[in-house]
């Protein structure tokens, strides 16, 4: 039985409730936790960066501090409003609803955090290839549907370490804060093996790694022109 399904039945329901209670006391963002991973892998070229599915704007604001221009796109109106409000004082950061297929090419960096599973996999990867200039970099934090035994073991490891990481990152008990708009949620449809095959077909040489927090990462540098 899949680890995620087990948490919805029998003893798993109580275990999941206990984990949620602990996580609520010591919360951490699985997505924001990877911003430092992205920041440590920025390309040499720093003219133009694109954050696809920019959400509440934390990452595109960070990119604005490192690039001459940073552009965030998101199809969700509430997310765009939150992102635009966060980046209001950053003149080199723009946020809009431009579809991925209409983004102009020549970017030094394209980032996606918990976004790729919302898109058609192969067409999205091809658009990233088109958008990046030679030497540009794609940095992606994604989710996948667990299928293999290895997937289940990583899910179990993520489940067990999740409250520990939360306590380390947020040792004090969380206090109520103003509500941010909720992120659009979609269960991942592609397995990691399917993602790996699609990435290797469209982005030869890309590095894909499993991560804790029910995540994986994709890192690719577009080859320079001959």
Image (cartoon, rainbow, N blue to C red):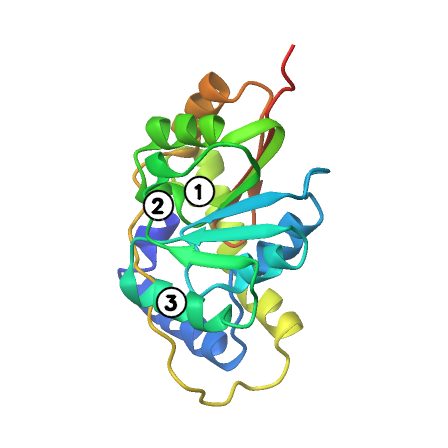
Residue that numbered label 2 is attached to: 2
Q: Residue at x 59, y 54 (%)?
A: 34
The answer to whether residue 38 is above or below residue 90 is: above
Q: Quadrant of residue 47?
A: top right
- Asked whether, in this view, residue 186 is left or right of residue 83, the answer is left
Q: Residue at x 58, y 51 (%)?
A: 69
Which of the pair 150/25 is nearer the observer? Answer: 25
Which image quarter: residue 171? bottom right
Percent of width and height locating residue 76: 29, 59
Identify which residue, 49 or 167, lies in the foreground.
49
Task: For label 2, count other residues whose C-alpha is less than 10 Å away and answer few (under 14), some (14-19) or many (20+).
Answer: some
Residue occupied by mark 1: 152
Which label is found at residue 169?
Answer: none
* Residue furthest out toward the top: 226
Q: Are marks 1 and 3 in contact (CB under 8 Å)?
A: no
Q: Earlier in the sequence, mark 1 or mark 2?
A: 2
Q: Where does label 3 land, which residue?
A: 16
Q: Position of residue 92 (x, y in %)?
A: 57, 58
Q: Secondary structure at mark 3?
A: helix
Q: Secondary structure at mark 2?
A: loop
Could you say where residue 108 lies in the image, as x and y percent from the top left? 60, 37
* Of pointers 1 and 3, the one earlier in the residue sequence: 3
Any part of residue 145 in sight: no
CA gap between label 1 and label 2 equals 6 Å
Badge 1 density bin: few <14, some 14–19, many ≥20, Cα 10 Å: some
Q: Earlier in the sequence, mark 2 or mark 3?
A: 2
Are the two marked residues, 1 and 2, in contact with CB atoms closer than 8 angstroms?
A: yes
How much space separates mark 1 and mark 3, taking CA atoms?
16 Å
User: Which quadrant would the C terminus be assigned to in this image?
Assistant: top right
Q: Residues within 10 Å of mark 3 (few under 14, many from 20)?
A: some
For the N terminus, which image quadrant? top left
Contact check, label 2 and label 3, Cβ < 8 Å:
no
């Amino acid at each position: 039985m899949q680890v995620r399904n087990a948490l919805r039945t029998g003893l798993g329901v109580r275990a999941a409730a206990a984990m949620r209670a602990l996580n609520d006391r010591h919360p951490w963002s699985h997505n924001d936790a990877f911003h430092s991973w992205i920041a440590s892998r920025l390309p040499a070229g720093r003219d133009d960066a694109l954050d696809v599915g920019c959400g509440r704007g934390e990452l595109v604001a960070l990119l604005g501090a490192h690039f001459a221009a940073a552009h965030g796109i998101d199809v969700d109106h509430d997310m765009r409003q939150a992102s635009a409000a966060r980046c209001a004082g950053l003149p080199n950061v723009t946020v809009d609803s431009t579809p991925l297929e209409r983004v102009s090419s020549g970017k030094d960096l394209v980032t996606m955090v918990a976004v790729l599973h919302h898109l058609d996999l192969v067409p999205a990867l091809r658009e990233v290839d088109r958008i990046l200039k030679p030497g540009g970099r794609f940095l992606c934090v994604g989710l996948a549907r667990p299928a293999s035994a290895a997937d289940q073991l990583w899910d179990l490891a993520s489940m067990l370490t999740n409250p520990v990481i939360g306590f380390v990152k947020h040792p004090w008990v969380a206090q109520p804060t103003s509500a941010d708009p909720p992120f659009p949620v979609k269960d991942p449809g592609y397995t990691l093996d399917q993602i790996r095959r699609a990435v290797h077909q469209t982005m030869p040489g890309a590095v894909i790694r499993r991560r804790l927090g029910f995540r994986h990462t994709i890192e690719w540098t577009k080859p320079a022109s001959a």
